Amino acid sequence: MKYIFDAAFLPCEALKEHDVRIVVDLLRASTQITTFFDCGGTLLVPVREVEEAFAAKERLGKEWMIMGERGGLPAPGFDFGNSPLELMQKGAPEKAVITTSNGTGALMRAAEGCPRVTAGCARNAEAVCWDALCSGTRTGIICAGRNGEFSLEDTVCAGMLIEKLLALAPANGASEMELTDGAMAALALWHHMGPDLAAVCRESAHGRILSGLGFDNDVFFCTETDESSSVPLLKEMEGLTVIVGR
Ligand code: MLT
């Protein structure tokens, strides 16, 4: 069986055909979503805009919490920010609507023309790679980027996931593996800058912004690898796009 592994540096690229797409927003949306399920949350509704989040809560009921950020901080009226450590400390709400500057939009974009979309990060790296290998032979890693720009930490993390896919695929029946140019570039960046993801994040533009906002501990938490077995999966449920944990 031949596997093809691909990486896109931004969700707005012309995306190739994939059986499964792993969306990576290391700092912090995909880590936040993974941690939500680790902390007992059951259902998330991702939306692009702040107004959509309030409208969704209005429609779904007041037991739904609103979670996310703008400029790294919770927007006025939000119940939770986008801090995975906040979830670890307070516990996750059972159901929440989430909107973040880049991550939730990247998930929606990845769902266009792809049957399976998951959220991947360092914490669930191995789990999300296994899920992809068991779901098809063409995996695309979609980096969320930052405001339409390349994001160093997402791409280095994508390279780490490519390395894991290459290592795990033979045990899942791979006799041949091909990397696209994007996957080769992400892997080369991981080989060049890894394996200290925390150092990469501290150097990166977004890491520095989060640090300036006092989120150093969040940044470190986001770089811990293989701590979670949650695989957040995008699904259509009663006309709504939701994320469930697996
Ligand atoms: C995003 O979607 O851009 C982020 O997750 C931002 C953040 O948490 O600071």
Image (cartoon, helix red, strand yellow):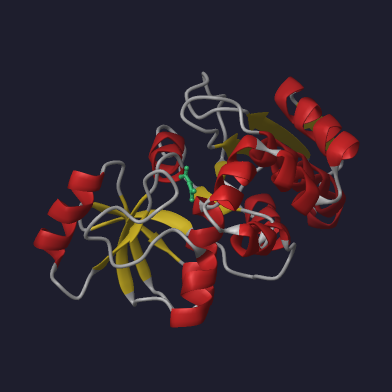
Task: Choose between 27 and 64: the one closer to the eye.
Answer: 27
Location of residue 172 (image quadrant) = bottom right
Residue 107 in the image, given as x and y percentages of width and height: 44, 43
What is the number of callouts on the image? Answer: 0
Task: Choose between 207 and 40: the one closer to the eye.
Answer: 207
Task: Choose between 219 and 229: the one closer to the eye.
Answer: 219
Residue 43 in the image, given as x and y percentages of width and height: 35, 68
User: Residue shown at 62%/38% (left/top)?
Assistant: 141
Vertical placement of residue 3 versus 28, above or below:
above
Location of residue 82 (image quadrant) = bottom left
User: Can residue 198 be seen?
Assistant: yes
User: Residue shown at 49%/47% (left/top)?
Assistant: 116
Vertical placement of residue 213 versus 154, above or below:
below
Q: Is residue 20 left or right of residue 68?
A: right
User: Residue shown at 53%/37% (left/top)?
Assistant: 144
Location of residue 20 (image quadrant) = top right
Task: Choose between 66 and 137: the one closer to the eye.
Answer: 66
Residue 29 in the image, given as x and y percentages of width and height: 49, 52
Q: Is residue 203 left or right of residue 109?
A: right
Outermost residue toward the left in this view: 59
User: Residue shown at 57%/34% (left/top)?
Assistant: 18
In which quadrant is the N terminus drawn?
Answer: top right
Vertical placement of residue 156 versus 54, above or below:
above
Vertical placement of residue 54 versus 85, above or below:
above
User: Can residue 246 be seen?
Assistant: no
Residue 121 in the image, given as x and y percentages of width and height: 63, 54
Q: Is residue 61 left or right of residue 94?
A: left
